[in-house]
């Protein structure tokens, strides 16, 4: 059985979180982390990696529409580096352009109230981020199995 992947939608006040199923096929949101101090945030992520037996951590990398670094993407990269120093598993940055906007749109269309949407958007964004990662990885594995590059 494969181990899980933990995804983080990094924010200044909250971090949306999602975890894959053990087979690495689907993503499920888990409770959002309310940010406190960086040291506490890193500790909590380490606890989640242990709790879910995660083999890897994916952080949404908020590049600009043109694919360039932003001030937030630099903050995410710095946080990823802190995680790398504490974890014994890979920590990857994954392009997350539009996941938060897509999450907000999905929640608006679902008809739930604005307060519930506000609380759910980070978790949904992390779930979308992780599902995109899992789908890309499955497509790459399929191509490799067929001998394509």
Image: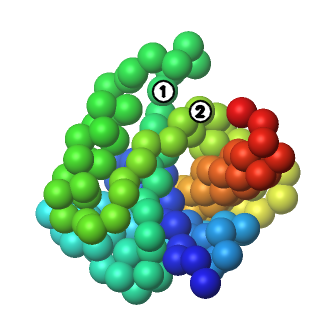
Using the rendered view, name the quadrant where residue 123 is placed.
bottom right
Q: How is the image coloured?
A: rainbow
In-front residue for pair 130/103? 130
| Mark 2 lies on residue | 97
Query: Which residue sits at x=66%, y=56%?
Result: 134
Q: Is residue 19 left or right of residue 57?
A: right
User: Between residues 131 and 99, which one lies in front from this camera angle?
Assistant: 131
Q: Residues within 10 Å of mark 2 (few under 14, many from 20)?
A: some
- Element type where label 2 sits in the image: loop
Image height of 123 relative to 135, above or below? below
Residue 119 at x, y = what percent? 55, 63
Do the CB atoms of the residues marked 2 and 1 lie less than 8 Å apart?
A: yes
Q: CA distance from mark 2 to mark 1?
A: 6 Å
Looking at the rendering, in which quadrant would you find the C terminus?
top right
Whether residue 32 is visible, yes or no, is no
Residue 136: percent from the left, percent from the top?
69, 46
Residue under numbered circle 1? 63
Circle 1 residues within 10 Å: few <14, some 14–19, many ≥20: some
Say above or below: 62 vs 115. above
Location of the N terminus by quadrant is bottom right
Q: Which mark is residue 25?
A: none
Report the side of 53 relative to 143 (left or right). Answer: left
Q: Is residue 80 above or below residue 39?
A: above
Left/right placement of residue 86 relative to residue 60 reads: left
Quick check: can you spot residue 111?
Answer: yes
**23 up-or-down from 108: above or below:** below
Residue at 44%, 63% in the rendered image: 56
Return the disc, 2 or 1, that comes first in the chain's sequence.
1
Q: Residue at x 30, y 61 (%)?
A: 35
């Amino acid at each position: 059985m494969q181990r899980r992947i933990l995804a983080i939608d990094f924010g200044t006040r909250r971090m949306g979180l999602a975890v894959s199923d053990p087979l690495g096929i689907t993503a499920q949101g888990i409770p959002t982390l309310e940010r406190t101090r960086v040291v506490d945030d890193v500790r909590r992520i380490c606890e989640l990696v242990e709790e879910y037996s995660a083999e890897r951590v994916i952080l949404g990398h908020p590049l600009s529409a043109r694919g360039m670094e932003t001030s937030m993407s630099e903050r995410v990269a710095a946080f990823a580096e802190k995680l790398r120093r504490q974890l014994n598993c890979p920590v990857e940055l994954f392009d997350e352009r539009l996941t938060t906007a897509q999450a907000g749109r999905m929640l608006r269309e679902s008809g739930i109230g604005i307060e519930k949407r506000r609380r759910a958007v980070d978790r949904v964004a992390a779930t979308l981020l992780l599902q995109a990662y899992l789908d890309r990885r499955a497509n790459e594995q399929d191509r490799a199995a067929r001998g394509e590059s």
